Image: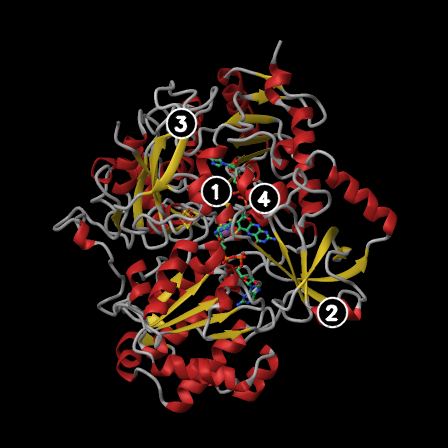
Amino acid sequence: MTAPHKTLCPYCGVGCGLEVVPQSRNPEASPETQRWQTRGDRAHPSSQGMVCVKGATVAESIDQDRLLYPMLRESLDAPFERVSWDVALDAITHRIREVIDTLGPDGVCMYGSGQFQTEDYYVAQKLIKGCLGTNNFDANSRLCMSSAVSGYLQSLGSDGPPCCYADLDLTDCAFLIGTNTAECHPIVFNRLRKHHKRNPHIKLIVVDPRCTETAQVADLHLAIRPGTDITLLNGIGHLLLTWGALDRGFIDQSTQGFQDYREVLRHYAPSIVAERCGIPETDLETAARTWAESQNVLSLWSMGLNQSSEGTAKVCSLINLHLLTGQIGKPGAGPFSLTGQPNAMGGREAGGLAHILPGYRLVKNPQHRQDIEQFWGLPEGRISPTRGLTVGEMIPALEHDQVGLLWIAATNPAVSLPDLNRTKAALQRSPFTVYQDAYYPTETAAYAHLLLPAAQWGEKTGTMTNSERTVTLCQAFRPPVGEARADWEIFAEVGRRLGFAEQFRFATSAEVHREFVQITQGRPCDMTGISHENLATRPIQWPCPSQGNPDTSPDKHNKRLYTDHRFHYPDGRARFMAYHEKGLAEPVDDRYPFVLTTGRLYGHWHTQTRTGRIAKIQKMHPQPFLEMHPRDAERLQLADQDWVEVKSARGMARLPLLVTKNICPGTLFVPMHWGALWAESAECNALTHPSACPISLQPELKACAVQVVPLSSSVQLDTLEKLGEAPPQRAAMVQRDPVESSRP
Ligand SMILES: Nc1nc2c(c(=O)[nH]1)N[C@H]1C(S)=C(S)[C@@H](COP(=O)(O)OP(=O)(O)OC[C@H]3O[C@@H](n4cnc5c(=O)[nH]c(N)nc54)[C@H](O)[C@@H]3O)O[C@H]1N2
Ligand SMILES: Nc1nc2c(c(=O)[nH]1)N[C@H]1C(S)=C(S)[C@@H](COP(=O)(O)OP(=O)(O)OC[C@H]3O[C@@H](n4cnc5c(=O)[nH]c(N)nc54)[C@H](O)[C@@H]3O)O[C@H]1N2
Ligand code: SF4
Ligand SMILES: [Mo]
């Protein structure tokens, strides 16, 4: 028996270690035909052998409907033709040169993903921000983590979650806000639940407009109205202040801005807060009392805070409570952003958003730009001083013909971006779109001129960083399918063809990584002590400087940031960033009286490119639905399973109703997983709007105003018939199989 291949689960930011072994039925098969299975890696410090259904089944999807060859077409209505890599790469370099000549470097846009490995991210930054000189690189993390990034930056002076998973076993109050941890970060939740069950005195508080699986086991569930988090958090702060439950020493020695914060808190008396949030005043008091009386408060959050038109303000309002009570930089405590994608963290480290540069640097900082230019051997002034277009801004840029080349990789924007009708029309306008993905078809392939087959999980070696700053080496265990290539290799080859031989001399991803970590030296995310070589023996958490004492030994796991209470501002003090609540960007009115919120289910991953192809998961979540409270259903004379049409000012979706008390009256929920290939008219983003937080520029995917009307029986029959036939995605695949159409 050969030793199992060690890698990381390619789904969520928990970052569970996996072992991959050949399926027992055919242990001697060739590398191309071998089937694989996964199991938890007991030696992985973050997950200790645990996995959820997604990690346990991921290997089942790796050979289904893969994009195998580069495919090119003249226009979006022409068929794809198989082309060689040489032709494909020439088409890109030719186009880039042409765009730079006509529109300038800012006519090139790349939209990447937290599903890149860090090496992919790094080489993409070097190509786009360094060699081409435009900061128009954004990632789907804009829809995901950017409010957490800007909140940490404003409050603590730098990005970087300060906590570690061991804190889940050490807290006596877990405050979960805007996170359905049980379904979306299951292994983090399991660990917390175990601790909670073993120690009945520890408190679990959940803040969510829905009674999710997470909320169902909470000691206290605050079912606030969507978008009222800042009011709630300031209301808790108000009570702590009133009771004198503060850490005076910490506030005096380690913070700034307390007076302004206190002034803001004055406006959040309990009766006002309870009324606005739609919760009993006694529940508000219980929550505040628990904060006041607990030794160690750990807060966890994700999209319920980040995906908001005041996402940064929500994050800062939460961190304020930690500063008020000194609940940071000690075991079992701190503000812990649960990262969404497997390498959202690595993207931040490598500078993978339109306003940042590698090593937690900022585009707007001249010294940071100069550091990177020198390091990359580029002339001074090459990196543009203006931040690039965010993905939200790429849409109007397409509408105004300011984009000459759009390069999309490892994300499926024709499902996941807000205001889909407008988004699709903008994509349709793009003069040249390159789409680099592992699967075909996906919804976005319909908008591409050039398809590039990407090697995916298991076919390329590289690193990813999870929520607790642990870097894991994801080892290849099989060759790429067809002619697929690693994302970083594609970017590097384009760089070389554009004349930057010196900058892209990498032969292996280990070399890319070696260069990347050097750029983190002396930065908050210093990883100079980490290499592919030492990661081959165990995952390593950062900060991990090579100077002095590289903390790579297993007993150095569970590192926390800010244990000395010195923060990343020049004066070493964290900042109280006080905000008043502004409310939802699109309030309800008589025409659109419901707030629609959107999110995830336990088994599915985003746009289903993998999980939709796994039978067990399909069975678990066979179809999309709309959650509605019984009181609302009764008022509209609707029953469970009835089909309805949901409409916003921008679009509509047709869904069967799930009548449940698990949602607040006036609020509706629809899962995000069903794009056009997987169901008829069930796209939640046909409804959502693109208004974003003015600081993080993250869109408010968690709330828009909608109306609900019963579906007429003829339309209903039509929709049902379509669902009853072959699953829609299968039909689409037969029509558009690139392998078929590429055969002579
Ligand atoms: N199973 C599964 N797991 C995943 C993923 C997946 O696709 N499937 N994706 C991963 C990724 S990329 C991400 S970003 C994470 C997301 O992880 P989560 O953020 O936990 O997931 P969501 O379901 O998007 O949203 C969380 C909750 O926010 C609540 N919410 C809505 N509006 C508000 C509000 O105004 N205030 C508050 N307090 N709560 C609100 C919703 O009711 C929902 O239950 O999951 C990761 N893990
Ligand atoms: N309404 C609403 N919309 C949302 C959200 C929400 O909560 N509500 N959540 C938002 C958030 S947080 C996120 S993270 C996004 C996620 O949205 P997307 O990023 O669009 O979702 P995925 O389905 O994960 O798309 C990843 C793609 O990468 C491909 N892929 C996998 N591995 C590789 C690889 O190694 N290389 C390449 N090149 N391709 C690869 C997959 O086949 C897939 O097509 O959705 C956002 N949209
Ligand atoms: S919890 Fe997340 S990382 Fe762990 S197995 Fe499940 S999806 Fe993968
Ligand atoms: Mo995400």
- Identify the residue at image location x=77%, y=44%: 720
Residue at which label 1 appears: 113
* Callout 1 crowding tier (Cα within 10 Å): few <14, some 14–19, many ≥20: many
SS type, badge 1: loop
* Callout 3 crowding tier (Cα within 10 Å): few <14, some 14–19, many ≥20: many
Outermost residue, left direction? Answer: 548
Where residue 291 appears, as percent x and y from the top left, is 38, 79
Q: Amino acid at mark 4?
A: Lys
Q: Earlier in the sequence, mark 2 or mark 3?
A: 3
- Identify the residue at image location x=29%, y=78%: 295
Residue at which label 2 appears: 632
Q: Earlier in the sequence, mark 1 or mark 4?
A: 1
Residue at which label 3 appears: 489
Q: CA distance from mark 4 to mark 2?
A: 29 Å
Q: Earlier in the sequence, mark 4 or mark 2?
A: 4
Outermost residue, top direction? Answer: 744
Residue at which label 4 appears: 619
Which circle, 2 or 1, is nearer the viewer? 2
Where residue 90 appears, as percent x and y from the top left, is 51, 19
Which circle, 4 or 2, is nearer the viewer? 4
Q: CA distance from mark 1 to mark 4?
A: 28 Å
Where residue 301 appears, as percent x and y from the top left, is 45, 63
Lateral position of residue 622 relative to residue 722, left or right: left
SS type, badge 3: helix
Q: Earlier in the sequence, mark 1 or mark 3?
A: 1
